[in-house]
């Protein structure tokens, strides 16, 4: 298996895009977007890690570092899958934000 083939859903090199609005808190929300890290093997499948920052124009910032669920096959598309993640941002300025989404199919 070629671990650098980004079109191979089971290859170690593939990544997923994500884009979401974090849950509002303290009267505001943030956007989070990026790419996961490469696939990390687990028995029977793989998962991904994602990390980054959400910020606003006023300099208010939160960081996050999360892991996804194992791969979930898309019905009728044997070589396509999604992952789910749920977690929270860092606690800054007296609050944090919940984050949850499905990653875009690989």
Image (spheres, rainbow, N blue to C red):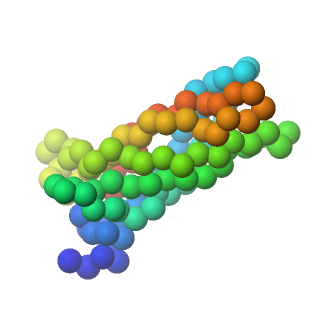
Q: Is residue 45 above or below residue 12?
A: above
Q: Residue at x 33, y 44 (%)?
A: 69
Q: Residue at x 69, y 42 (%)?
A: 62
Q: Residue at x 28, y 48 (%)?
A: 70
Residue 31: image x %, image y %? 63, 39
- In the orientation shown, which residue stands out farthest toward the top? 27
Q: Residue at x 45, y 61 (%)?
A: 37
Q: Is residue 77 left or right of residue 36?
A: left
Which image quadrant is residue 12 in?
bottom left
Residue 67: image x %, image y %? 42, 48
Q: Can residue 28 be seen here?
A: no
Q: Is residue 12 left or right of residue 29?
A: left
* Tally of numbered tags: 0
Residue 52: image x %, image y %? 60, 52
Which image quadrant is residue 34 in?
bottom right
Residue 91: image x %, image y %? 67, 35
| Quadrant housing the C terminus | bottom left
Q: Is residue 66 above or below residue 14?
A: above
Q: Can residue 74 be seen here?
A: yes
Q: Is residue 71 left or right of residue 64?
A: left
| Quadrant housing the N terminus | bottom left
């Amino acid at each position: 298996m070629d671990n650098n083939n980004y079109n191979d859903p089971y290859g170690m090199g593939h990544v997923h895009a994500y884009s979401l609005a974090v849950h509002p808190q303290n009267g505001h929300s943030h956007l989070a977007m990026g790419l996961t890290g490469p696939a990390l093997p687990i028995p029977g499948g793989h998962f991904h890690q994602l990390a980054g920052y959400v910020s606003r124009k006023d300099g208010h910032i939160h960081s996050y570092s999360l892991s996804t669920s194992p791969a979930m096959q898309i019905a009728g598309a044997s070589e396509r899958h999604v992952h789910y993640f749920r977690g929270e941002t860092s606690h800054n300025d007296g609050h944090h934000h919940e984050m949850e989404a499905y990653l875009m199919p690989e």
